[in-house]
Amino acid sequence: SRIPSWEIAEEIIKAINDYSKEETLLDKIMLVASSPTQVSSFQYALNNISIISGK
């Protein structure tokens, strides 16, 4: 069975958020989505990062 797009987006955003808390040389990241549904899922996850990250 396929994993829903929103679950994947949440996990990716959580990982990026966790990684960004450490000292890093990264300035920017690029997320590439292959469908409008994935874009929407990433937008939702980014807009709700405080809820998703458990803050």
Image (cartoon, rainbow, N blue to C red):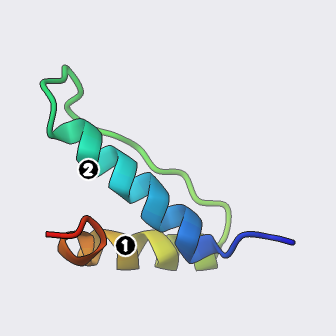
Q: Secondary structure at mark 2?
A: helix
Residue drawn 37% across the image and 72% down it: 45
Q: Earlier in the sequence, mark 2 or mark 1?
A: 2
Please determine whether, in this image, residue 50 is positioned above or below residue 17.
Answer: below
* Quarter assignment of residue 24: top left
* Quarter assignment of residue 22: top left
Q: Secondary structure at mark 1?
A: helix
Residue 2 coordinates in the image, percent (x, y): 81, 70
- Give the residue pinned by disc 2: 17
Please determine whether, in this image, residue 3 is positioned above or below residue 22.
Answer: below
Amino acid at pointer 2 = Asn
Q: Residues within 10 Å of mark 1 (few under 14, many from 20)?
A: many
The quadrant the C terminus occupies is: bottom left
Numbered mark located on residue 45 in the image: 1
In 3D space, how far apart are the residues under numbered discs 2 and 1 (Cα atoms)? 11 Å
Residue 13 coordinates in the image, percent (x, y): 37, 57
Residue drawn 72% across the image and 69% down it: 3
Residue drawn 54% across the image and 51% down it: 32
Q: Residue furthest front?
A: 54
